[in-house]
Image (cartoon, rainbow, N blue to C red):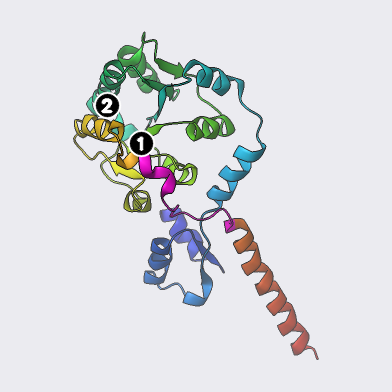
């Protein structure tokens, strides 16, 4: 946030991903003529990756192993999750898998030793729990796109889930991306990890909030942010060139 404010003071153009982002800039007294609501280029990038990247063999293997199962894709690595909160979350997820034979858990494990040790202790040795080495971004996006449900404490995933039309449970007390919750595609666990168990069951129920994820509008854009940004810059350059020519005429 500090870097955003410092860079914002130098910027000529401010491209806002959402109406809330635009409102924040205007509240900071950025000139309205310098603010443009374009959506987030990460949406463009996700669409491009899914259309063009070759299938990752690790992802292909785990998808084959979990065919016909409801895949829960997990990511957790934030330091505020360490300790009892992370342990309880993983225990709840294991019990959920154990009590639902049609559910599989896929977890690309962050290399932090705290995460690795806790994960092996709580989630190890279960045939429907797949613990993977960290994935590159292309492979990770491919895995998310085939999830039934995403459970994560990541900030970026909160933008990726709506783009992919996948329901998300956020393992955090609060979020800097409230749009994902407000649009209905995400639920925030909050400080009490026991809420996770309730949310998992709610997502599993017939005609649940999770089943409606693909029908929701992505609050982070339509996948044309890059083109809209280029259009703004191009128009500015044309206007600047015309002004320069007029000044010398």
Q: Is residue 22 magenta?
A: no
Q: Where is residue 105 drawn, in percent x and y? A: 39, 22
In the image, what residue occupies the spot 51% across and 58% down? 39
| Label 2 – label 1 distance at C-alpha | 11 Å
In the image, what residue occupies the spot 46% across and 57% down? 4
Q: Is residue 220 magenta?
A: yes
Which mark, residue 153? 1
* Relative height, residue 35 to residue 172 (above, below): below
In the image, what residue occupies the spot 48% across and 33% down? 144
Q: Which residues are magenta?
A: 211-225
Q: Is residue 18 visible?
A: yes
Q: Nearer the viewer, residue 211 or 239?
A: 211
Which mark, residue 89? 2
- Within 10 Å of disc 2 (Cα), the crowding (few <14, some 14-19, many 20+) is many
Sooner in the amino-acid sequence: mark 2 or mark 1 = 2
Kind of element beneath mark 1: loop
Image quarter where the C terminus lies is bottom right
Q: Where is residue 199 drawn, in percent x and y? A: 25, 35
Image quarter where the N terminus lies is bottom left
* Relative height, residue 124 to residue 4 (above, below): above
């Amino acid at each position: 946030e500090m870097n955003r404010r410092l860079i914002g003071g130098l910027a000529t153009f401010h491209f806002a991903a959402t109406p809330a982002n635009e409102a924040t800039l205007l509240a900071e007294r950025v000139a309205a003529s310098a603010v443009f609501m374009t959506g987030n280029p990460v949406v463009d990038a996700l669409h491009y990756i899914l259309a063009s990247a070759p299938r990752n063999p690790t992802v292909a293997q785990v998808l084959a192993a979990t065919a016909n199962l409801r895949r829960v894709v997990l990511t957790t690595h934030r330091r505020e999750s360490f300790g009892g909160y992370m342990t309880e979350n993983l225990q709840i997820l294991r019990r959920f898998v154990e009590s639902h034979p049609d559910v599989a858990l896929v977890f690309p494990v962050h290399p932090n030793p705290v995460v690795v040790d806790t994960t092996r202790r709580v989630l190890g040795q279960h045939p429907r729990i797949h613990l993977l080495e960290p994935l590159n971004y292309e492979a990770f996006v491919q895995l998310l796109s085939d999830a039934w449900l995403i459970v994560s404490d990541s900030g970026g995933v909160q933008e990726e889930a709506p783009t992919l039309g996948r329901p998300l449970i956020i393992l955090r007390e609060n979020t800097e991306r409230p749009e994902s919750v407000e649009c209905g595609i995400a639920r925030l666990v909050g400080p009490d990890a026991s809420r996770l168990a309730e949310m998992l069951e709610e997502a599993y129920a017939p005609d649940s909030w999770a089943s409606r994820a693909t029908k929701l509008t992505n609050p982070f854009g339509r996948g044309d942010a890059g083109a809209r940004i280029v259009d703004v810059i191009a128009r500015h350059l044309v206007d600047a060139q015309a002004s320069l020519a007029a000044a010398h005429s």
